Amino acid sequence: MFSEPRSGRLAAWGNALLAHKVSPDEAALAIVGEDAVHRVEGLPGEAAPVGLTLALGRLRSLGVTGYRVALPAPGHPLGLSGPPEFNARALEAGEAVVGTGAAWGLVPEVHEAGPAGDVHAEVVWHCLPVREAPPADVPSLGEAERELAEALREATEVLTRLDVAASGPVAEAALDAYRARSEWGSGEVLAPGYPPRAVRVLELARRIGLLISLAYGNGHGGAVSASQMAARAEALRPVERVARRAQVAAYNAYVEERERGRG
């Protein structure tokens, strides 16, 4: 099922901390979420991994004034600016945080441990140099909102034609789960200080992501032929790309607004 990237939580609450909207402990608690622990490795001046509170303070003292998100996928370096080593690690993780004001970025490495039914995640953020350059392929909030509306409309037409939702108790249960999860509030993820439009864009991207998860996870629906299944995948691919672009635009809105205010 669709979930928010850890990089999104770190960027959102890291930005709220930089804006003096939350305390260091509040930011660290929100970033960790349901994980067991987060640590930062490779931080300048630290020989061993350190906790989030210390790490966020150290990055601030190094000159970091904001955090952007990158959600790269093969062939789509969304939000990245280089160098190649950082890009490669971010692509392997599927996400990263890129600092502004000072050329440092963070890439998460997740370790899961524990018995079945009681698995917990421990996260190590690798601190690496980044290139100070515009991030790749990140839209404005307005562009992201328009793209989401258009992509959802087009995909809905195709998926309806292919009868992807199908019917029966399994499909109904999946749809009920979608309706329940779509009630989540994006404000709890974006953190204080973000503009209302960013909250709206992230909420729509999240709902579309959940719908995509259902379309992939609910068997083959009515798309019983190979050509229909291929058509469904073809319809969902651009929607997934648009949803990722919108997520990045929403998380990056704090930095974008601050930079516009300086312009």
Image (tube, rainbow, N blue to C red):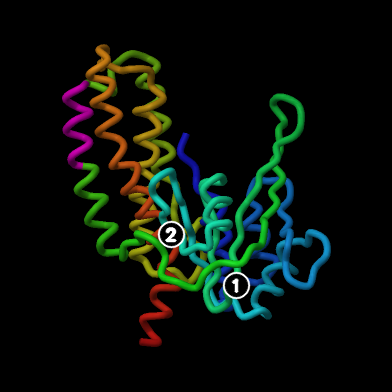
Q: Quadrant of residue 152?
A: top left
**Above or below for 30 versus 235:** below
The residue labelled by disc 1 is 17
Pick whichever, 253 or 29, lies toward us. Answer: 253
| Residue lying farthest to the right in this orientation | 47
Task: Tell me: 4 left or right of 138.
Answer: right
Q: Which label belongs to residue 217?
A: none
Question: Magenta residues?
Answer: 153-162
**Above or below for 259 versus 46:** below
The residue labelled by disc 2 is 79
The Cα atoms of the two marked residues, 2 and 1, are separated by 22 Å
Q: Is residue 229 magenta?
A: no
Q: Secondary structure at mark 1?
A: helix
Q: Quadrant of the C terminus?
A: bottom left
Q: Secondary structure at mark 2?
A: loop
Residue sitting at 53 percent across and 57 percent down?
84
Pick whichever, 108 or 76, lies toward us. Answer: 76
Dominant secondary structure, magenta: helix
- Within 10 Å of the Cα at label 1, are there few (<14), some (14-19), or many (20+) other Cα atoms? many
